[in-house]
Amino acid sequence: MFCLCPKAERRTPMNEKRAADSTVEGIIENIVYYNEMSDYAVLEVLDEKNTLITAVGTIPMPSEGEKIILHGYWTYHNEYGKQLAVLSFEKRLPEAVDDILKYLTSRTVKGVGPVTALKIVNRFGVDTFEVMENHPEWLTDISGITPKKAAAISKAFREQTGLRSLMMFCGDRLGTSEVTRLYKQLGGDSVEKITDNPYILCAEACGIPFEKADAIAHTLGITPDHPERVFYGFCYILNYNARVNGHTCLPKEKLIAAATETLGLSPDILTEHLSRCLSEGRLARFVAGEREMIMTREIDEAEGYIAKKLLALDRDCPKYSASDIALLAEKAEARIGIEYATLQREALYEALHRGVMILTGGPGTGKTTVIRAMLFVFDSLGMKTVLAAPTGRAAKRMSEATSEEAKTVHRMLGMERGAEETVRFDRSEKNPLEENVIIVDEASMIDLSLMSALLHAIRRGSRLILIGDSDQLPSVGAGNVLADLIASDQVRTVSLTEVFRQSAESLIVTNAHRIRRGEMPVLSRTDADFFFVRREDERTIADTVADLITNRLPKTYGKEIRDRIQVISPSKKGAGGVELLNVRLQERLNPPATFKKEKQSHGVTFRVGDRVMQNTNDYDVEWEKNGVAGTGVFNGDIGVIEEILPTEEKMRIRFDDRLAEYSYDLLDELDLAYAITVHKSQGSEYPVVILPTYACAPLLLTRNLFYTAITRAKRMVILVGRADIVHTMVENHREILRYTTLRERFSEESR
């Protein structure tokens, strides 16, 4: 059963074990060790008696030359001797000239190295920080510092000091990466904004877990039953379930139950608070059948708008007669040189007779043939058509299949950053798309928010054609849009079922349809494009996969096949999970070498030549494509690390034809991608797919996940593992439950 209540994240304070009994004030002379992920540091500090002491503990972002006050207790290490175990600390900017120079020389401020630091301190002495913060134009008096560089130094210094103030305010409750993200989001007055309302921390844009925001709120005197605490608690639970479980709403009783556990208040008190939130319009309700569903206002508006707009498009679009459509279909057949099957003709008819239609079908059923026919017919009628898909790889595949340009939905809509770092689209009801026909492939991947944005951009009288495979996994984001549209019976759906001769010769296609019907795939053949390598001992799966990629397949098909293989696993964990496989495959495919630079981040070693994947949407990452600059790398995009530049604290990664730059503070957005999960593979296609079949979480051993995995392969599938797990996946037809109200909204809007 999926989780409705977020698990509390609690870091046990060190002072629960022992209270601080010593205080040391001094200057950080040397950073012996610092872990960016955990913020654990080993420092040498010169105290007020000019004695060098060793301090250990969680001390985020230390800098040599920095003045620091440490509170803790003395311990004795067998190898390193006497040490101060730090429980808490305070930081201050250095005041003495020598300490200021040491502070700047340590490259704490971006753009200021040892040479520049010496020039600045020699010129301004104890006033250096005042000049850098408030009078950057004075820095241009120094040789080599241009007005542009002076402004950049001042900005970096202000960001650094603001960041440190925020770090001190948050104490040990937030990690360095979280504080950095917060500062970028909230700006220079971050502390004031958080003090005014600490629960803005758990807003979606900030992304701080509610428990951490709640801990900060507690220190500010916010009471457990404060209306803002309860409201943001409700929002946190709703947003958590949208992000993790894909729910756009929750039944009232489940929301109250989850809030009781999360907020520690009684159901009666929470019900009273919920009634107030609903009456004030801060949350929304929708009655679906006999259940009262609760959701955020944004989702309520999105679901209502989607149903209303789709019905309007279907109603207002000009219709063509059956005879005209038949004539156009014949012309398309003559032009393309093919005779359409009955269901393909039906799909073409509905595309011209409806404002909105859905085309579904498994591999080899001729969806691409129908798209080509539609393009020909719409072009002959003088209509402007645009092709799009949710991901870059899916758009690229669509382009290759149709010989027409296809864009990502985000690019088609003109994605850009709006106020308060929110994502917005240039295309909207005020500036709609110019095309008469919008065809979107891989529609099962479209979540609620993207569908809402798409529909806002489609002008009245236009056509929308959604193409997808209803048997694949639902979108990563909240909602179950394609399935809800089909289930509503308000959007005409044509399902292609006939597998054509050429495709039927592929065992990948044959097995995909067998799995779809709940039948075991053929595993015994060794002369086709679908293979099974039996490994009953799961401990041998990872090594077998590595051997296939590094030795057996290259020996048969040539070394170039290595770059065409993608390992796809049901889970991150376990003997055939992504985490273990990525370690093994990196060791074999891209081992360390003296000429390969490396960078460690969040427990992962990144190396030049590594295959990596973006694990979240980041609309700000800068890239260049054929001399043209752009921004935005999205969840699931796969690239290769081309350069690691330690002095500039960044790396360059090539995503197909885009070269992107990542500063080190963005590395937690990357994972190794020698192996990826099935969910991350959606919308992509690979020449060769290797799928481990092993015992993992039952919720992941499902038929639609298995089906989604093998339909990612274009030329070859290799299963490695246990046959009984294959049987389990085929038999497990349990659908992923998602609470939504979109299907019911159609009934309400069509009354």
Image (tube, grey):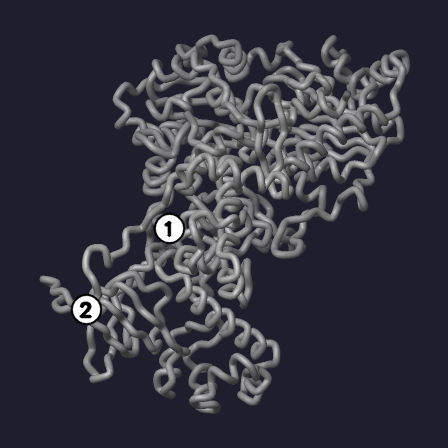
Query: Splitting the image into 4 quarters, where does residue 90 fall?
Result: bottom left
Depth order, front residue of 381/294:
294
Q: Is residue 578 above or below residue 99?
A: above
Depth order, front residue of 466/200:
200
x%, y% of residue 524? Answer: 39, 10
Q: Is residue 28 above or below residue 675?
A: below
Q: Residue at x 56, y 12 (%)?
A: 505
Q: Quadrant of the C terminus?
A: top right
Image depth: mark 1 or mark 2 in front: 2
Local crowd size for mark 2, using a 10 Å CA cut-off: few (<14), some (14–19), many (≥20): few
x%, y% of residue 233? Answer: 48, 44
What amino acid type should be assigned to the residue bearing mark 2? Asp
Q: Residue at x 40, y 55 (%)?
A: 218
Kindly tell me whether residue 630 is visible in this rendering: yes
Judging by the rendered image, the residue that carries numbered circle 1 is 602
What amino acid type should be assigned to the residue bearing mark 1? His
Dot 1: what SS? loop
Judging by the rendered image, the residue that carries numbered circle 2 is 21
x%, y% of residue 657? Answer: 60, 46
